[in-house]
Image (tube, grey):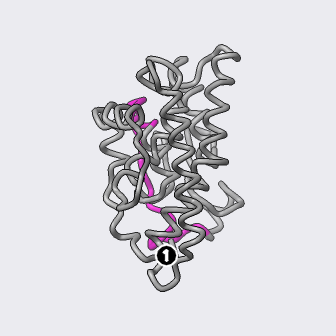
Amino acid sequence: MLKVWGRRSSFNVQKVMWLIGELDLAHEQIDAGGSAGGLDAPAFLAMNPHGRIPVIKDGDAVVWESHAILRYLAARHGAGRFWSDDPVTRAAVDGWMDWSQTALQPDFLTGVFWGLYRTPEAKRNWPAINAALARCARDFEKLDRLLEGRSFLLGESLSLADITAGTSLYRYFELEIDRPSLPQVERWYRTLQGRDAYRTHIMIPFGELFGRLDY
């Protein structure tokens, strides 16, 4: 059986669990990181020398880093869904996956969610937070334009591009922040909310993280 190490409140673990839910894979989730600890245990470091979650074990295969895990699961279990066998189609998915990891996630998760929500009020750096909010607005406006006339980011089918970018939406729309008008993103978000795997693995209350700088 597929085994997944990580905590449910971890943003990167949530991406992986969402895809596992979409693929309807039997799995065992093992709490690791945060209050569960275990990341410095020799057995865990033997799987991931970086000591970070998520990590999966699928038969003899051990895979770490969330986007590597997503590509692995889609390739091995997706039968061409989510991550195409066609290199041209796959490259478009890869481009938006990498953009999500190098632009959207730092701007939102690090700049806004960590800077505003997870940082105690007395320690908040408001110039940095406001700059991150502005970058997030531009990021989501790009997605809004991309979604014009289509159900998902790259067409009419859910792909890994949606999973990597869409994981941000629940927290983004739940935070008490100013947001630009995003009609297409809001429509896309409603579509994702209609999926069982999204509701189960992404729409997880995050109040336990408020004002906490540790994991």
Q: Which residue is mark 1?
A: 119
Which amino acid type is marked by label 1? Thr
Looking at the image, is 1 positioned above or below residue 22?
A: below
Q: SS of the residue at dot 1?
A: loop
Q: Looking at this rendering, what residue extends furthest in the bottom direction?
A: 122
Image-quadrant location for residue 183: top left
x, y (%) of residue 28?
41, 47
x, y (%) of residue 141?
51, 39
Looking at the image, is 109 positioned above or below residue 26?
A: below
| Residue drawn at (67%, 56%) of the image | 48
What is the count of numbered marks? 1
Q: Which residues are magenta?
A: 19-39
x, y (%) of residue 64?
63, 48
| Residue drawn at (31%, 44%) of the image | 200
**The stretch drawn in magenta includes residue 25:** yes
Image-quadrant location for residue 106: bottom right
| Residue drawn at (33%, 67%) of the image | 207
x, y (%) of residue 175?
37, 59
Query: In this view of the protein, which residue sits in the foreground, 207 or 69?
Result: 207
Looking at the image, is 93 positioned above or below residue 2?
A: above
Horizontal side of residue 65 vs 130, given as left or right: right
Horizontal side of residue 102 vs 159, given as left or right: right
**The stretch drawn in magenta includes residue 41:** no
